[in-house]
Image (cartoon, rainbow, N blue to C red):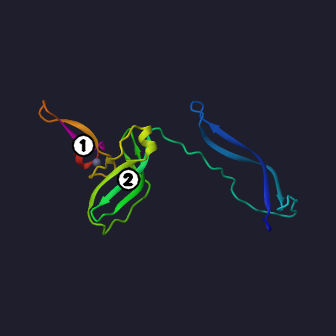
Amino acid sequence: MENTIHKVTVGFTSQVFDKKTGECISQEFIAGDQVNYEDEYGEPIEGDNNLYFPLEMVQPEIVDPDIATGYLVSDWDCGITISIEATLNVKTWELVTKANSVDLDGLGCLERDFFAPDLKSQEKHSLDEEYELCPDCQEFLLRPVLIDTDKTNMVPSMECPNKSCQSNQ
Ligand SMILES: [Zn+2]
């Protein structure tokens, strides 16, 4: 490219790996003192070149073994379906959505919302295709349980694992 200055920094990269899994956890470029400025043909450029851009490297994505990824899907009675990227902690059944808030005014009544894990997470965590979101706290997925009604009858029901949820008070 014409009209370019090539700043060449001599240094080294350092990558940190997990001993057990062999996974790369982080990496950085450690710049040395030697910096050369060259033109597009590799010819040195003389003079003061105070050009700076951080030498940050892309960090590997650390995958939490208890986190499933997918979508929070909301069905509205006006026929609109909204999907938001979400993650589920398969130990606690807590759901976290990526969007801070979605403006749902004027959409009418929510028919149901559920978490749909992506195919990779379905396989990895042996999950079904969808799970109902707790309508009370909207933070946890409902879990199937058997309720002992009169010591003889066990009735299947759904329970919110959130201890501070209204449905458990
Ligand atoms: Zn709840």
Residue drawn at x 80%, y 67% is 2
Point out the stretch of residues depicted in magenta: 155-162
Q: Is residue 163 magenta?
A: no
Secondary structure of the magenta portion, mostly? strand
Which label is found at residue 72? 2
In the picture, measured across the screen, residue 19 lies left or right of residue 12, that is left
Viewport quadrant of the N terminus = bottom right
Q: Is residue 161 magenta?
A: yes
Residue drawn at x 78%, y 58% is 7
Q: Quadrant of residue 122?
A: top left
Mark 1: C-beta under 8 Å from nearest atom of ligand 1:
no
**Which amino acid type is shown beneath numbered disc 2?**
Leu
Residue carrying label 1: 158
**Which amino acid type is shown beneath numbered disc 1?**
Met
Query: What SS does tag 1 mark?
Result: strand
Residue drawn at x 77%, y 46% is 11
